[in-house]
Image (cartoon, rainbow, N blue to C red):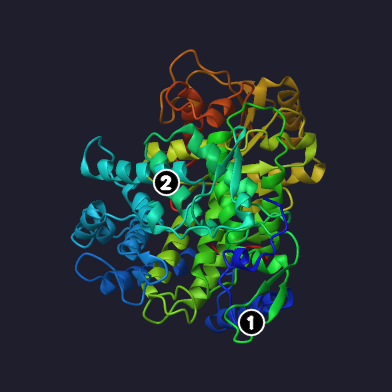
Amino acid sequence: MRTNLILPILLLLCLPLAAAVPTVADLQKNREAVQKQNELARQKLKISPQTLTDEQIVAAMKKGVDFLLKSMKENNWESAKSWATDPKEGEFVGGETALALLALLEAGQSLDDPRLRYRSLELASVVDYITKLQSDRIYVLALQSCVLAQLPQVKDQPYNAALTRIKDKLVAAAEQSPAYGYSVKKENNRPIPPTDFEALFSLPFHGRALKYNWLWDNSNSQYALLGVWAAADAGLSVPADYWALQDAHWRATQCKSGGWTYNCPINQPVNFIDYVAADKTPHTISHEVLQKDTMAAAGLASLYITQEFTDTELRTEPKNDPNLAAALKHFADVINVYAFNDLYQLYGIERVGLASGYKYFNNLDWYRQVACTLLASQQKDGSWLFQENAGKSANVGTAYALLILARGRNPILFNKLEYAGGGGTWNARPRDTANLTRWASKNFERPLNWQIVNLTSPPTEWLDAPILVITGSRDPKFTPDDIAKLKTFIDNGGLIFSSTDGAAETFTTAIKKLARDLTDAKSEFRPLPKDHFVYTAHYPIKPPLPPMLGLSNAAGDRDIWIHSPTDLAAAWQRKAYLTQKPPFEIPANLYFHVTTGEGPHTRKLTPRLQPLPQ
């Protein structure tokens, strides 16, 4: 897939051609103009990432909810200005409605608004419409799947039957062709023109070459994967080969820089003829122009989804994954939190943020920045434009904005600490905390988030979660400054919870040594009794009890650190929800204890004590 692509007709598959060919400098100039316009709007409204509050976000969400409910007609949101019918891409009836309904259901998890319940007077007819909707279009099916996955899944009942049908369609389409076009039906997809380059459209997989049987693109592909993932998260069975196939596609089509184009990997300047221009003048275009910021987010988020199903190995050392590392670096380099004129792009940033767990990209707190952009670009009627001057329905833009704001307000159960010492073994099991949080979300019956924080950020910024998780198999080699930050977190009410990968004694020995530094040698770890809150706070843990160690503060009146010398995180990484309950119930007990038994609270944003990096 890394072959020179210079054939004009092939390049026409890679991007929509415009009369003028942009350069890298043109793209950068446009980004700077958008940022300046965004910052002026922020200043006019007197909002900034530093001063952003939860009350401001809630007010904006309520206005957006009211707009969508007012713009609904009977049982749908299909709009003549939307993508409902596109002469080039076919019928998309139901897609706009599915997206709007998904946004309102997500907002209902964040706001106390009875109108946003799936059986409410306002939404019941829309839910029925989406459940019965028949479509072959990828975007529609994927969004349907995301909606239905939020509804009660009782086997053979309407929601479950509809979700199963859609999941089966999406999986079967990938069996015909590895990546997705606009439809699950071959006859409704554009064929790949017969050329000598046809061999490029094949994918190495399990020792054979799979042929791409129709024109695919990474936008449809990311949404199809999201739809299948939603079905899997709702408990439906998906073949293991599906995840492996999708993982192979995203890796094979990745550009050398770490990003992705719309549907071709281009790694060098290429020649093509602009067929829109009247003079048919040949042009040379840089590969950086063909790589899209939106596809950088699509590819990275997709790799995190496939990683969940393809990487369950119980390592004690981090795995070298060049594709994921390059994608993460590229995404951090091109992230555009100011793109108020492209809600599709902002939603991509949100997907990467939640899938990866990273709170920061290049020192940017992505949620605060994106939320600030959304508040600065909200229209007076409460809506958001999908794409500036694109003629798209405001229903679509408003739905994307609500999805971003609502999901970012989900309670954060755990912050996982990224550290460089000890060979970086903090991430040997990359999906451990993500899987633990998903288990908690299912059991607490509300969406929950987790985050990755680092030692370069102020410890007061770790307090958006009450518990800081530290995992590893070696001595993390915390510096005196690192230890001071851990102490600040604890002194402000935080609790540290550590688990030893592979039950490695080196890690536990290092954690015990930290006790002296944190408490001025006035306290040390002690075995916890069977009536301790880690065994009793919410879930009564049955014998045999996993051994746990506790560290009290210097005054001896509060536990500040709970440590597991055994490998609890192994069960998290393997998603052993049914066979190994204590590894999941113990951290849940910790959470209920520190929240005084009330359980998850919506994330609260308050003005920062320290300025955010710009």
Q: Secondary structure at mark 2?
A: helix
Location of residue 487 in the rendering, given as x and y in whole percent from the top left corner = 70, 43
Residue 253 is at least partly visible in this image? yes
Residue at 41% across, 23% down: 540
Task: Please state, as top left, top right, bottom left or bottom right, where the C terminus lies in the image.
Answer: bottom right
Q: Which residue is mark 2?
A: 173
Residue type for callout 2: Ala
Q: Nearer the viewer, residue 139 or 112?
A: 139
Crowd around label 1: few <14 · some 14–19 · many ≥20 (10 Å): few
Q: CA distance from mark 2 to mark 1?
A: 37 Å
Residue 553: mark: none
As drawn, 585 above or below 113? above
Which quadrant holds residue 9?
A: bottom right
As drawn, 252 above or below 511? below
232 to the left or right of 421: left
Residue at 62% across, 26% down: 314
Location of residue 84 in the rendering, given as x and y in whole percent from the top left corner = 34, 69
Extreme-top residue of the structure = 544
Residue type for callout 1: Lys
Q: Which residue is mark 1?
A: 280
Location of residue 131 in the rendering, given as x and y in whole percent from the top left corner = 25, 51
